[in-house]
Image (cartoon, grey):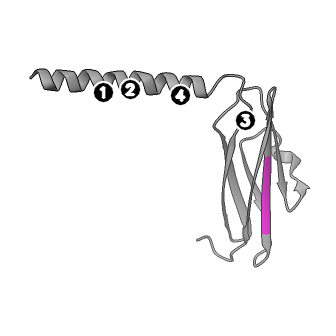
Amino acid sequence: MSKVRTAVRALAGTAVAVGTALAVASPASAHPEIFLACDMGAGRVDCMVTDVGGGPPYTVRWWINDVQVADFDNDFGMTGTCVIGRKTTVRVTVWDSHGSDTDSRTTYCPRFIP
């Protein structure tokens, strides 16, 4: 029974150490670190961006094929159009008071939603 208690205590201590390391590794002053996910099909593109660093307030800008899509300024998601059979690039930049990050996705716009 004491071996089980010792193992549980060691595991709890490890969990506290990992939690502390994660808290130190992601300070509130970090710049945004974003991830962009997009679905394309039937002449349409839907994208969402998630921020895994930084903090509000945010400024968000979207581009499709290097043309800014101002209708979605400061939104973490956007819906636009793509030309079926042509390569389409979606890019997003997120700024906060500590810096910025940009991510993009390029793919061919399919006729049907996959």
Amino acid bearing label 4:
Leu
Q: Residues within 10 Å of mark 3 (few under 14, many from 20)?
A: many
Residue 6 lies in quadrant: top left
| Sequence-first disc among 3 and 2 | 2
Residue 55, image x and y in percent? 70, 27
In this rendering, the answer to whether 41 lies above or below 101 is below
Q: Nearer the viewer, mark 4 or mark 3?
A: 4
Q: Label 4, label 3: how many angstroms apart (C-alpha)?
A: 16 Å
| Nearer to me, 58 or 12 | 12
Q: Nearer the viewer, mark 3 or mark 1?
A: 1
Where residue 15 is drawn, which disc sits there? 2
| Residue identified by numbered label 1 | 11
Which residues fall within the magenta stretch? 88-92
| Residue identified by numbered label 3 | 32
Amino acid bearing label 3:
Pro
Q: Residues within 10 Å of mark 1 (few under 14, many from 20)?
A: few
Marks 1/2 in contact by CB < 8 Å: the verdict is yes
Residue at 38% x, 26% y: name it. 15
Residue 49, image x and y in percent? 68, 46
